[in-house]
Amino acid sequence: MTRRFAFLLLTTLPAAASDLTHATVVAPARLTAPERKAVSLLIDSVRERTRVTWPVVETSPGTGKPVVTIQQAATGTALPAEGYRLRSFDNGGAAGVEITGNDERGVLFGVGGLLRALEMRRDSVTLPGALDIQTAPKYALRGHQLGYRPKTNSYDGWNVPQWESYIRDLAVFGANAIELIPPRSDDAADSPHFPLPPMQMMVEMSRLAQEYGLQCWIWYPAMDPDYANPATVAAALQEWGEVFRQLPRIDAVFVPGGDPGHTEPRHLMALLEKQTANLRKYHPKATMWVSPQGFNAPWMEQFFGLMDQQPPWLSGIVFGPQVRVNLPELRQRIPKRYPIRFYPDITHSVNAQFTVNDWDIAYAQTEEREVINPRPLDESQIFRVLQPFADAGFLTYSEGCNDDVNKAVWSALGWNPEASVLDALRDYGRYFIGPDMADAFAQGLLALERNWRGPLATNSAVEVTLAQFQDLERRASPQQKLNWRFQQALYRANYDAYLRARLTDENARERRAMELLASARTGSVLPALAAAETALSVDPGARAGGALRARVFELAEALFQSVHMQLSVPRYAAIDVGRGANLDLIDRPITNADWLLKRFAEIRALGSDTARRGAIDEVLNWTNPGPGGFYDDLGDPANRQHLEPGTGFENDPAFIQTPRTGFGSRRNTPWRVSWYRHAEALYGNAIRMRYWGLDPAARYKIRFTQAGDGTARATRLVANGKFEIHPMRKKDLEVKPVEFEIPVEATANGTLFLEWQANPEESGNGRFVQVNEVWLIRMK
């Protein structure tokens, strides 16, 4: 829950740096076991970064010697939970630092605060200025999901020491909770990367949370098909109970209503009431939480009706992906007695809760869904718009270490919502990379996010970002070059730059091919086709940016060795190319070239030059709506002037009331670029288009394409709110333009308003309305 807190007060005075290289750590005998783990975190972190091992004693060595004192505040003092004070002082001419925790976790987070402030170099530990910090967190829950399962892009390869190291890293940045996943979920039962069986690793991770005094949550999906059946419920109680019994710590269980699972709310809630009693047999203080994910409109209303009854066994509600109402509305509809926990997806870049706003198609087709994705500014915007409505705090949705930067940003803001994102990134750079690169690395992370802004073809900043990271690489020590966080940034910088080099070259080839194709209108057809094909063809050994491509492959190997990132299916046994294995997609088509080559082959097979010229004219005039007409490519932010924009990402980062740019599932047959990208409206919302300046005396017809997901969802098209252009109609899985006449009454005043409406019975991922291209054609 939200709570009162003191903002960070950090004073860095123009005094000389304090030398703590030879400091002694004073840790009184009365420290608890979790507090002693905090001491070990401090000692180990300093040693790993500097080769300096601080001795630990129970009583002060006296004045004149540098010391770091760790203690808990005096009992009986009313201080905010998990807060701490960090204070530097003069210890008789030597440096002194005092860490005073308000409670056990306060000691841990105080250690983290000091580690973020220290400048640790080889054989040297310094404090750059005076410290006076007194702070406590705003949100009581600040955590991250750590799913040891095959679907993740790295986690399934980690052993227990790696998990302990990563959990420590999260705690240094203020996280107080982790969320585990049970052995049975929507994953394969095993992974070739698992060092331990899933249940055994789950026990180990729960033990680590217990040892460090962190909350341990369980994300537990209700996977079985029929919880109305008493036998199914009995089996679930036995299965879940066995998991609960084995774990040394559980603070809460969160059951999603869908994704995965698909149970009607009344049966789901009845199951969870029984599971709550089951849970408390082994963990008496543990709580039960549920989310309405994946519900259709009728089920959502049923869920709200059940919540109005205020079941006493339920502790809170979770807002996660695929919830069909926005977080502010959910907070309004849920009784106030139930806190809401945010479950933000920080790991996915497309087809997700918080997609990259108007991402370029070249990135979406290659870097794909689980790319290394530092999005510090986007994540801070999501946090600041939506987190205030989730009073319990947050525990993020993660499927690997690709989102590591985003975890640090959320943790920093969960502690202090007014925190500077740049300062948080500098802390990240200082602690994980090194003090001499802290600012440059932080600026580089922001630059990687800027690489994704706007059209890639015109974003020359991509080369600047690469140059900045290449400079850092030249300056890096051998240890820094082996650092997986450093390698991740280099991978993205090189991948982005290679992609832009490809796009620049292949766009030029496509323009030349279309010029050559146009010569068939008046000249020989088959030679024009052959020349256009030659212009489009790319020799794999002579691709633009070949050196960058080779460097990406080198870095992929380095990341597999350093942190078990699985960036390729054949090379590293990733589970799927869409699960972070974007090395396999690095040469995927990003222009119309493959579609054009397919069309050229079809045109060549036609029986006459007349037929061939007609087909060529269709290709050349694909986007031409004719005199008095209009064409919109709804997936291209620069070419959709008639699309109603909604409230925009800045105010609606979940795109509940804003159409967003989406990307379709790649089929076996080549598509146009305009078929891979589309505008989509989520849940019960509509794609809306508005036209003006039409000829009141003319007749018009609408032509459009719908590609999108591989699901044949139904939509209804209505003009001006009253003229049904077509009833609920499932889209064709084979992409092709469809046409409908517009009633003349709809355009009689020179304007037209079109709405593609969703089927209210739809449930699932929420991507219910997807439209690619729209032609409004004036009929002759």
Image: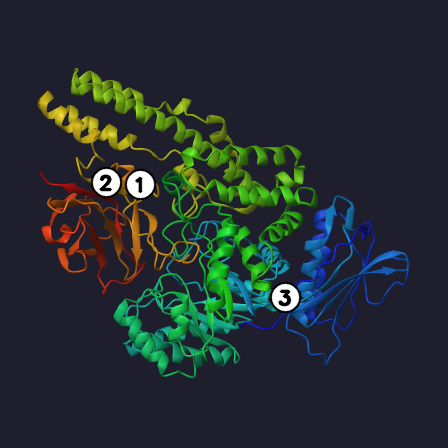
Could you say which disc has been placed on residue 212 in the image? 3
For the C terminus, the image quarter is top left
Nearest to the observer: residue 200 or residue 470:
470
Image x and y of residue 579, in percent: 41, 48
- The 10 Å Cα crowd at callout 2, few under 14, some 14 to 19, many 20 or more, is many
Asked which secondary structure carries label 3, the reply is helix
Category of crowding for the residue at label 3, using alpha-carbon neighbours closer than 10 angstroms: few (below 14), some (14–19), many (at least 20): many
Residue highlighted by disc 2: 631
Which of discs 1 and 3 lies nearer the camera? The answer is 1
The image quarter in which residue 650 lies: bottom left
Circle on res. 59:
none
Determine which quarter of the picture holds residue 97: bottom right
- Of pointers 2 and 1, the one earlier in the residue sequence: 2
Residue highlighted by disc 1: 639
Residue at 59% x, 60% y: name it.
418
Q: CA distance from mark 2 to mark 1?
A: 8 Å
Compared to residue 683, the image places residue 645 above or below, namely: above
The first of marks 1 and 3 along the sequence is 3
The answer to which image quadrant residue 526 occupies is: top left
Local secondary structure at mark 2: strand
Q: Is residue 626 above or below residue 425?
A: above
Residue 212 image offset from top left, x and y in percent: 63, 66
Residue type marked 2: Tyr
Q: Are marks 2 and 1 in contact (CB under 8 Å)?
A: yes
The answer to which of marks 3 and 2 sits earlier in the sequence is: 3
Q: Position of residue 393 (x, y in %)?
A: 52, 68
The Cα–Cα distance between marks 1 and 3, rounded to whole angstroms, is: 53 Å
Q: Residue at x 51, y 48 (%)?
A: 374
